[in-house]
Image (cartoon, rainbow, N blue to C red):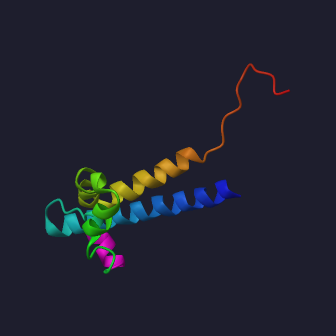
Amino acid sequence: MLRFIFRILGLFLLAGAFAALVIDGTRSIAGGGLLLTPLGKTISWFAPDALKNPQGLLEGRIPFLWDPVMVRLLLLPTWLVVGSLGTLIMALTRKRRPRIGFSSR
């Protein structure tokens, strides 16, 4: 049951990544150049109060993660981050293939 829930979550993330890719592609065609939406901007669209002071929130608890990890993650395109997370969840929750040549007893 838990595997099923995570598979559904992975599929929703992959669908969201595809939608973000289509939106970025449409904006790029209309703008005449490559326009990518960073993850930080997408988060601020969905939850405006979430990124008011994320640095202060993380630096107090885990200071080593802010600059090398979170800043770069928030600057990556949304479709790349969401798609990678969805692909990772889908890969981790797939059923294992039966081993050939070994007894199942």
Residue positioned 43% across, 65% down in the render? 16
Left or right: 52 in relation to 13: left
The answer to whether residue 44 is magenta is yes
Residue closest to the far bottom: 49
Residue 83 in which image quadrant: bottom left
- Residue 59 position, x and y percent, is 28, 61
Where is residue 29 drawn, in percent x and y?
20, 65
Is residue 75 found inside the magenta-colored segment of the image?
no
| Residue lying at 40% horizontally and 61% vertically, measured from the top left | 18
Q: Is residue 34 left or right of residue 102?
A: left
Q: Residue furthest left?
A: 32
Q: Nearer the viewer, residue 34 or 53?
A: 53
Up-down relation of residue 82 to residue 91 (above or below): below
Residue 88 is situated, as x and y percent measured from the top left of the image, at: 48, 48
In the picture as drawn, the residue positioned furthest to the right comes out as 105
Residue 103 sits above or below residue 89 on the image: above
- In the rendered structure, the answer to whether residue 6 lies left or right of residue 33 reads right
The quarter of the picture where the C terminus appears is: top right
Q: Main secondary structure of the magenta part?
A: helix
Q: Pick the quarter of the image with the N terminus.
A: bottom right
Q: Report the magenta residues as a range.
A: 41-47
Picture quadrant of residue 34: bottom left
Q: Quadrant of residue 78 in the image?
A: bottom left
